Each structure stands twice: as structure tokens, then as C-alpha cells.
Amino acid sequence: MRVTTKLIPVALLPVVVAIAAYGWGARAVAARGAAPAPAVAAKAAPARAGSGNAGAAAEYPQLKGAYRFDENGWIYVHLHGSPEDIGFQHGYLLAPEIADALKAIEIEDVHNTHHSWAFFRNAAEKMLWPKVPAEYQAELKGIVAGLAAHGEKNIDLWDVVVLNAFQELPGYYVPWYDEHHKTADAAHMTSPGNCSAFIASGAWTKDHQIVIAHNAWTNYVDGERWRIMFDIQPEHGYRILMDGFPGVITSDDDFGINSDGIMITETTMTQFNGWNPNGIPEFARSREAMQYADSIASYVKILNKGNNGGYANDWLIGDRKTGEIARFEEGLKYTRLWTTKSGYYTSSNFSSDPKVTKYETTFNPNDPETSPNARHKRWLELMKEYKGKINARLAEQFESDTYDAYRNKQGPDQRSLCGRNDYSARGVKIWGWGPYYPGGTIQAKVTDSALAGKMQVFAHMGPPCGKNFYAKPFLAAHPQYDWMKPVLRNMLIYPWTEFQSGEAAKH
């Protein structure tokens, strides 16, 4: 039974709206270049499969037992079986959302990097694809086949691979490429640096078990689309419950649990520099770790094998079997692991290993004004104040916190744990966010050892602080962001909602 609760003392406006996918229009296949053919020939697209899936499953047996439903702003999707079947189900059930997401990523990447979409597709085919493990190659091909079966015939494999690498190609590969190729008119690209998360255990939590929470920060173009709750039951490895982005095989923000009790989240390291073109894509490594890890050590081992430097993160990891928690800081040249059974690790886009900070970032850890450091300070205040009391309910409040520890006043703004840069005349220069840039906290998730044992999480769609975001009046007030107009949408606030693996639609 799903319990929907409203636990945070902020103005929540649970407005239910229909999410209409943007039509992408015809894109000439010839302009794309050749790509491997889908595993299943495209047929006339039937009605989208939802919780009532019998008709579609009769036509496409791969869909049997797969389903989706909408709840409080989230799209819950159950996928299961072989890699090919999981991919097909993913592509078919989320076809309109994937097409819409791909349009948004293409507009962003081309505008921000000064590179063409063909440039990214070439990187996907020549650099990333040969390094993707066979299991996930099969799943990605399955997504393309599912899209084609649903009628999305103008999306091919290289588009889907670029979509899966949308966190690592623009902010990690492009700066490396531009530097090594002396690119004329190179854009000033920085690695992403935004999210707020913590993990605690032992003496810091109310029941001495693990509590883990995360709120995702990104631009509102991506953020409004970051609304998938994936329940994946693969034929090999552990079952996964994670949030995610349409068409992407890993969580990517990241928050998830597996059926062996591994609990993970992360935040990116601000101003990280590094890329290994011969490494394994981060989206494949992080998915494999979530699917196969049975301990903190195995999670770290899988994640770090073939590290390409893409999407360099501070990973917060818990093992509910032992109560142990960890921070794994994964640079490209330097990595470091901290573990404890009684303590906490917080994360807000600051690096903790002096070697990583000095040699792999340009981040200044001593500037108290900047967002990562102000949020770091606020995390330390909260951990001290609530030692021995932390539970899932408090975690929801932490992820909704609007106190600016630099200004010593309530926000929300670009420095609060739950951030709203669209309220800020200053912006965040180190991330390339100008004044009133439409970015900030876009959703949040919480779980603890007891919930994870039942494969349950609480999730909040929309920023759990501030008000609804409305695109039209925002663009009227800030025309410098008009380039986002085709893909910037309203982002509404919903209540905290419980999700569980194997959950069926209520209607």
C-alpha cells in the first residue's frame, strides 16, 4: 500500500497536470549515418501500454508483465527479464518521454558546447560504444527496438547512447576534446556541480541503522523530465529500485537501492577536470555496480573498473546488512574510500581528498560564499544539531532546508541545501549559472535500512522548497534564456510519496 504524506513545512501545491510530450518532428535518417538495426522490426504503433498491457503484450511478447503508471508527478515503470527485454520494455513504455528528453538534450548540448549533434553521435559510436559491456549493449539496442515498435523510428542507437551519456559528454569529454584539439571558439564548459545528500548510521541515527537522502539539482529543462521511478528485475544480479531519466539505463542523479541491501547516492565534484577516452562510460559502470554489488567493497570495485573520469562523484554508499556506510571519492587520477558504522558523510559538490581538490579540480574549498561550501557548512550544522535523532522524516526536512549558512538567513537561494537559482540575482559562476538561471533542486528521495529491506523509498517530485516554476512568465522576465523556450516547461510541486518494488497501479 502506498502512503502519500505531506511532511515538510513548506508550501506544497500538488497540482495534477497532464504531461504532454513535445513532437519531435521528422528527422532524416540519412543525416544521421548508419547504425545497427533494431532487434525488432517496427510495426504500426499501438496504444501506449500502461498498467493494462494485455493488448500490447499480445503483439509484443517482450512486454508481458511490464507496466507503467503515473503517481504524484512520477512515472513508475516496472521492467524485467533479459537485457534485450528490459530495454524493449523501457523503450516501448517510455517512448514519448524518451523522444521528448532527447529533443531537450540535443538543444542543450548544441547550444552549450558549440558542437553539433553529429559530433556527439560520433563520440557515442566511435569512443563510448566499444567500451560498453555486452549486457548493456543488448539493453540499449532493446531500447531502440522498443522505440521503433512504438512508432519512434527516427531515434537510432547512437542517439540513445548519447542520451545515456548526457551527464558525462558535455561537461567532461567536451572540455578534454576542446583542449586536446585546440578547438576554435570553444565554449567554456564546466563539469556539473550540484546536488545535496547525506548518509548516516550508528550513533547519529534514531534507530542506529542507516538513513540516506538526496535532492537533485540541475537545470529545469532536464529537471522537469527527471521523473521516472524504475523498478528493474533483471535475470542476473539484484533487483533495483531507482529514480531516473527517460531512456537512460542508470539513475544518473544518483539514488537507488538493490535487493541485497546496497543503498547509494552521490553528488558531483565541482570544477572537476579529467577524461580517459579509453575508459568505460560512467553510465555503464554505475548501472553495473547498482545491479551486481553485494557490499561496499564490491560496489567500489565495479564502479572504479575502467574509470573514464566521466561524471566524477562523491559516492555515498550503505550496506543495510552490516550498518556500514561509506564515502567513495572517485577522481580519475586519485580515489579515496572512507567507511564507518557510526557516523555520517555529507555531500554537496565539494571534494574531500586534498589530492583530488588540488590536482583534479579548480575548486576553492576556502571560499565561504560559494554554494558547495555554504551547503557543506549547513550540513555540518544539521548533523551536530540532530545527532542521535536522524530518521527518514528528518531526512525529508533536511532535503527541504532553505537556510543560507553564508548569509545566515532563510532562502531558498543558490546556497541552501534545497536550492533555487531562479530566485538568485547572483547565480553560481563556478557552474556557469548566470543570474536567475532556471536551475536548482528539482526532486528528492529518502530511504532507511528498514524501508530498503522492503525495497521502498520516499520520493518528492518538484523542488521541496519554494513555489511552482512556470516557464512562460519566467521567460518573459528573463529573455536571455529564450533559447530554452522550445523545451522549458512548468515544474510543479507534489507531496512526498512512497514507492516500492513490484508495486501495481492503483487504477
Image (cartoon, rainbow, N blue to C red):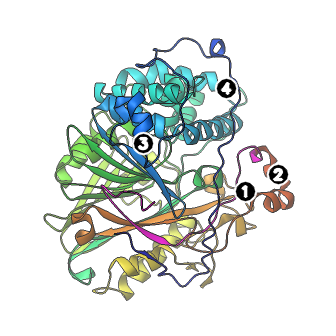
Q: Nearer the viewer, mark 2 or mark 1?
A: 2
The numbered mark at residue 324 is none
Q: Residues within 10 Å of mark 2 (few under 14, many from 20)?
A: few
Q: What is the CA distance from the residue labelled 3 to the residue labelled 1?
A: 45 Å
Dot 2 and dot 3 residues touching (CB under 8 Å): no
Q: Earlier in the sequence, mark 3 or mark 1?
A: 3
Question: Which label sits in the foreground, 2 or 3?
Answer: 3
Sequence order check: which comes first, mark 4 or mark 1?
4
Judge whether residue 34 can be spotted in this image.
yes
Judge whether residue 71 is colored magenta: no
Q: Nearer the viewer, mark 4 or mark 1?
A: 4
Amino acid at the residue labelled 4 = Ser
In the image, residue 11 above or below residue 216: below
Task: Give the residue pinned by disc 3.
Answer: 53
Q: Quadrant of the N terminus?
A: bottom left
Nearer-N-terminus badge (2/1) = 1
Q: Position of residue 310 (x, y in %)?
A: 44, 39
Q: Which residue is mark 2?
A: 480
Query: Which residue occupies 58% across, 39% down?
Result: 96
Magenta-highlighted stretch: main secondary structure? loop
Q: Amino acid at mark 1?
A: Gly
Residue 112 against residue 344 in the figure, above or below: above
Q: Amino acid at mark 3?
A: Asn
Of the pair 262 and 427, the residue shown nearer to us: 262
- Of the numbered discs 2 and 3, the one sitting upstream in the chain is 3
* Type of amino acid at the residue the image marks with label 2: Gln
The residue to which callout 1 is attached is: 434
Q: Earlier in the sequence, mark 4 or mark 3?
A: 3
Q: Is residue 116 left or right of residue 475?
A: left
Find numbered disc 1 in the image and state the secondary structure of the residue it sits on.
loop
- Specify whether 239 is left or right of 93: left
